[in-house]
Amino acid sequence: MANLRVFTTRSTVSLSPGQGFPAYMRIAIVINTSWNIYNFRMSLLQALLAEGHEVVAIAPEDSYSHKLVEAGCRFVPVRMAKGTNPFEDALLTWRLFYTYRQVRPDVVLHYTIKPNIYGSLAAHLAGIPSINNVSGLGTVFITKDYISNIALKLYRAAFRYPAKVFFQNQDDRKLFLKHGLVKAAITEVLPGSGIDVQKFVPNATFQRHQPFTFLMIARVLYDKGVKEYVEASWMVKARFPEVRCQLLGRVDERSRSGIKQQQLEEWIATGAIEYLGKTDDVTTVIVQADCVVLPSYREGTPRTLLEAAAMGKPLIASNVPGCREVVEQGVNGYLCRVRHAADLADKMMQLLQLEDGQLQQMGQASRRIAEEKFDDRLVIARYLQAIKEVTKDKG
């Protein structure tokens, strides 16, 4: 194999020990896309850099990789094929092992399914402690087929090795324990990836938009409840034709749960929804919505709901793991039955008929929940402590 390509820029942070760490550590963050690191883990990355540590981002190279370098990281590209291919997955374990042996991090932080599984095996073989984060179970516990059975066996084999496994809700943790996939002693629940409550803020004054606007933010997948959202939007518009129902998120036809572009275009053509494509500036879209909707089949702790809550928006989501951690029934929104378009439509109509004062109170409750339960500083503090614990012999 050719030598590793490493992209780096000089970090401007001061090199000072902090919170009982060794004076300097090299910490690797491994995720399935650079986009994911940049959009969901930058607060943690910046906190580690501020502590004076070297951060190495390991992920497939994409258009966000250079932004990680600009933020002060080293970037090491590693190819991760989508889908389930035993040969490719075996190669990924070897590629990550090779990368870890070359980079020689003091600790590896794994996120998303393939890094969690194959990265754990590679880190174990390389003799490097690892911390995993189960940010959602994807289709493993939703679609019951031979692939999900294989995934369970792989989790059971790989999760013998991490020093710590973080979950984003108690339901997922209990499910892993029930199936004997991980030892309880190394598990802990975090409030998702947290949310930067200084970046995501409400408008200074309450505004009800005309027409009333619902917004769903998610990849265009069946498992996210897109089909139910389209059907519910039709029902709502049948009674309130002026209402806008928008969908923001990228099409992912290669996913097991992916919705074909042709199907999406047919739904758009009916007028049920407006498709907004994708954007890196989600705040400008959320601010124009009256309510954010996520009828997902299962989540870790959905980032889109956290962003909307921090911006003071009422929420509607499925009564499933992950979503019900963010949405409190009747307080900051409504929970609907999973895979049930009619119930989702009913909740949407209930909310849009609320008086302005009631709508404003729900939005304020969302903001309070974001501040009290999901401030990303809580997540960062726990990660700093966990890194200290698993690397204590290196001090």
Image (tube, grey):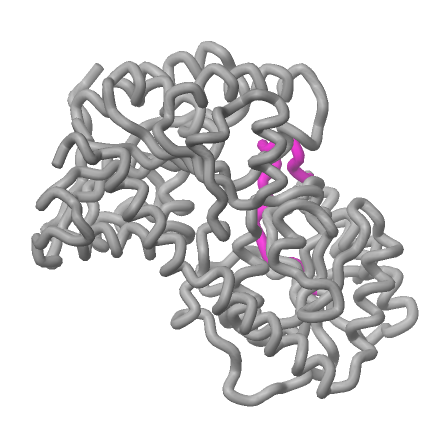
Residue at the image position 41 percent from the left and 12 percent from the top? 90
In which quarter of the view is residue 364 placed?
bottom right
- The image shows residue 37, relative to residue 125, as above or below, that is below
In which quarter of the view is residue 169 placed?
top right
Q: Residue 227: x, y in percent?
A: 77, 47
Q: Residue furthest front?
A: 185
Q: Residue 263: x, y in percent?
A: 74, 43
Relative to 334, 60 lies left or right: left
In which quarter of the view is residue 179 placed?
top right
Q: Residue 303: x, y in percent?
A: 52, 54
Residue 319 visible in the snapshot: yes
Residue 67 counted in the magenta span? no
What secondary structure is the magenta-colored segment mainly? loop
Relative to 140, 120 lies left or right: left
Residue 60 visible in the snapshot: no
Count every numbered label the image shows and give the total. 0
Quadrant of image for the C terminus: top left
Q: Please state which of residues 359 and 90 is positioned toward the viewer in this rendering.
A: 359
Q: Please state which of residues 131 and 206 is positioned toward the viewer in this rendering.
A: 131
> What is the span of residues highlighted in magenta in the rendered image?
246-259
Residue at the image position 85 percent from the left and 66 percent from the top? 236
Residue at the image position 84 percent from the left and 49 percent from the top? 340
Relative to 115, 318 lies left or right: right
Residue at the image position 58 percent from the left and 56 percent from the top? 277
Relative to 318, 117 lies left or right: left
